[in-house]
Image (tube, rainbow, N blue to C red):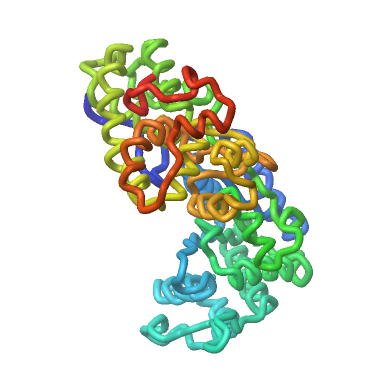
Amino acid sequence: MDRSPYTPGAGHIPPVLAGRDGLLRDWQLVLNDVVTGGRVRAQDMILAGPRGVGKTVTVSAFADLAKQPGFEVVNLQAVSGHASLVEALLQRAQTRIAEDAGPWKRARKAFERVGGVNLSIAGFGAGISTRSRETGAPTLDAGTLAAALATLAAEVGKDSPRGGLLVTVDELQVASGPDLALLAATLHRLNVDHPDAAVLFAGTGLPFTPEALRKAGVTHPDRLFVLENIPLTLDEEDARYAVVEPARQLDVLWEHDAATKVVEVSNGYPAHLQLFAHTAWTTAAGPDTITAADVDDAIPLAAAQLERRTLGPRWDRITDRQMEFLAALALLGGRAASSAVASALGRTHQEISWIREELIEEGDVYVPKRGQLAMAVPLFSRYVLSQYERTRPAAGIPLLGLEEMTTNAGLDPRQALPRREPPTAP
């Protein structure tokens, strides 16, 4: 069938944002409260979770809700090793001034004080730097930046009485420590110096983002931000709704068993839910019903695409020790105590801690609760087990085999060792 309503791919907004009703409701209340009460009522939010769970699209929905009453929205992206977030903000200011945007033009001098430049000069971004050449630290004052944001929000409010300013930052975990510290200090100065300012912040990051903030010197990020942990998977009801509702809006129905199979094969993981639903739609004969047989036909096609585009390339990039670590975690079911992974590898917790930290920072695993680890992509566990023994002989160092890990972990070999099957088969 044509016109698939599903949107596989990073950052693509799904037709139905299932499972996020509570977050969107709370955000609507915050928008109302910050306009009427200023920063006193602000709740700056960070959505933390593994990749593929819908953090970016949820913040995009926050931005859409903010635009409706007249908020100015500044969407920024943290990029490792690139320009600072403040430089990106000043670039945005220059662009909006050039576009003759009234609030930005009226707030121009406030932003010029932030960067110490004339924002009306063409080509501003070519050589501007807001960092010390010696230390790499920002040369900015959080109070000056807070004043500029408060000024802009006030100017927006003159044109839109129910408006204000929303700043969003995606992928916070890759921002530099000085940038994170400056962000936190700026929001704090807004609270202290500009309590009436209608300024809000929302960001996204991997699960270790709160720890990245602490390492940057933000001693109590939970006091400054509302930290929302986005779960890895949707519950069954929300996952089924994400499959069925977009089709229903186009007068297409899913057989109950067909929708159930998509939920099961994707584990309710939002990114894979969209992929399997999209593939079933595009392979279904139609014209107005998607059957369980259609899903059966779609599963191997979606699995092959997933292996080729996502799982395989990631597997090829990991180091030998990371590969061994992931195999042990997968053997334990994809979620286990860190001590259990160490036992399966025949090592101490301290000996594997550096590998664990690497995989956390790269987003392959995350910490669902203290002392535990989990695969950040549910289907990766099955893929790892299907590939490990084939890949292990080519490693540059000796790696434990799955049988030895099974013995170390005290597992039943008949249940622990993988069957040779496609990683995404139901």
Q: Is residue 123 above or below residue 148?
A: below
Image location (x, y in percent) of residue 366: 57, 44
Where residue 24 appears, as percent x and y from the top left, is 59, 40
Side of 251 relative to 153 (left or right)? left
Compared across the picture, whether 25 is left or right of 309 comes to: right
> What percent of the width, then of the height, locates residue 246?
39, 27
Image location (x, y in percent) of residue 102: 50, 71
Q: Is residue 100 above or below residue 136?
A: above
**Can the viewer see residue 32 in this picture?**
yes
Locate the C terminus by quadrant: top left
x 56%, y 86%: residue: 132
Q: Looking at the image, which residue is at 40% across and 72% down?
A: 99
Q: What residue do we see at 31% from left, 12% from top?
A: 291
Where residue 343 sits, quadrant-wise, is top right
Quadrant of the image containing the N terminus: top left
Q: Nearer the viewer, residue 58 or 297?
A: 297
Residue drawn at 38 percent across, 24 percent down: 249
In this orientation, which residue lies closer to the viewer: 217 or 91?
217
**Which quadrant would residue 424 be assigned to in this image?**
top left
- The answer to whether residue 369 is above or below residue 87 is above
Label total for image? 0
Report if residue 116 is visible in the image: no
Residue 180 or residue 391, whichever sits in front? 391
